[in-house]
Amino acid sequence: MSVAAPNSKEQLLVQIASYNTALQGSSGLPQDLVDWLSPTLQVSSFLSHSPRGPDIVVVGFQELLPLHLGLSGASKFVIDQRSSHILSQIEEHSPEKAKYSLLAKVVNVGIALLVYARDEGIARKVCDVQTNWTGCGPGFMGNKGAVGVRFRVSDVFDDVERQGETYTFVCAHLTAHQQKLQHRIADFHHIVGTLLFPALPFSEDKSPTTIYSTSHLFFLGDLNFRIDLPKSHPMFENAWAHVSEALKESEARETLKEFDQLLLERRKHSIFVGFREGEFWQFKCTYKHRLGDVDQYDTKRVPAWTDRIMYTTYSDAPGSLEASHIRNLLYTYIPSYTISDHKPIVSLLLLPYVPPSNISTTGSSRPIPTIALPEFYTPKPDPLATLKRYTGRTLDRIVGVCWWLLALLGAGSTVVGVFNFIVGATAYRWWKASRSAAI
């Protein structure tokens, strides 16, 4: 039995895109998504003699729609609209005009995740598709939190089905503001503990599993980590102007990365243990941009690389911070989108070649491989995960419906709605008191 040598055609291409659309709802995306979803197709042409589209396309959103509508449960309509639009754009700009299928979609409040796969290829092998969500806002509400998708890709070798490998994708929106670093760290660990999936297929242990119980793991979204300059740094005073100017040069950006909160915390192993990331400093900060401008930052915030894509695979060494068997072919932002204060990001990842597994005489195959982690880190499912999730969802609906009613009373403005409610309640009490006095 001969084993084919690895080549790019036998390695999966995964395209990952993320965008915080700033509560824009149905108007949050332009009709033509070529700038965002097709730059990777140009890179993929280097991998073969002819251009090649991605095998898996993952698109994540944060702040999908106005918050009161998201809390009320109205997210499904918006994500259904976007799902159809994105699918048509992927197929339209695919170099071979390949057809894709939607494997899974999941949304919670304003955080959404869509996963597509090529019909001719991996889509035929996908099984055991699972989705989940969790909130880490006040009271576990979903204004911040994460959604996830997991699936298994089975394989057949010598007419024997292998258990294959699992793929897990997580889209998250963590706590905002520079000074709330510890909240973001807590958000991540809350997501690890409560964004749970069923036990892996063929596993004897039937307990829920964390996002790390997978062969390949990808984490994307508005993670909200900021550039944290120490007070002794010469750029600390008037940081916005200094950082905005420094972002124009690649060497200066590389220096700035040393003050990126996420990178610093990863080096301390306090967060994203086992994950890798491409060279995010090769592109300018994705936040906070002036609406309507391609390359101008809003003076209200010091620019930062808030939007990120992280990844790891089971063959990566647990003690390494950077080296990965996943090849990062492209990692960039798309400046031409101007309807949000964030810029969308996109990455193209080439997964490692997987040789056929050894098949025993009994027809069994290797167990599903999972992420290798250092000894000091053992993620554990939160036994109260379900209670926390549904407590948050209940609060979402109560707050969302009340907020929506106030906005309706104010003809779209919550502030006006509150004012109208107070005026109306006061008038009613006055009328009732006047009537009682008259009697």
Image (cartoon, rainbow, N blue to C red):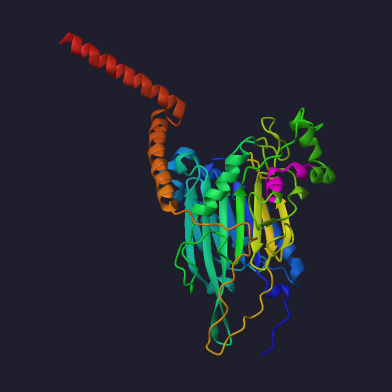
Above or below, 115 relative to 31 = below
Point out the image quarter for the N terminus: bottom right
Residue sitting at the far left: 439
| Of residues 263 and 424, the one drawn nearer to the viewer in this rendering | 263
**How far across and how far down the image is residue 185, in percent?**
60, 45
Q: Is residue 262 magenta?
A: yes
Quarter of the image where one finds residue 226: top right
Percent of width and height locating residue 354: 66, 75
In this image, 321 relative to 377: left or right? Answer: right
Depth check: give the residue in front, 434 or 147: 147
x and y percent of residue 326 in the render? 70, 64
Q: Residue visible at 66% across and 57% down?
A: 275
Q: Residue at x 61, y 55 (%)?
A: 219
Is 84 drawn above or below residue 158 in the view shown?
Answer: above
**Eyeballing the image, is 131 above or below 280?**
below
Q: Over which residues does the magenta segment extend?
A: 256-266
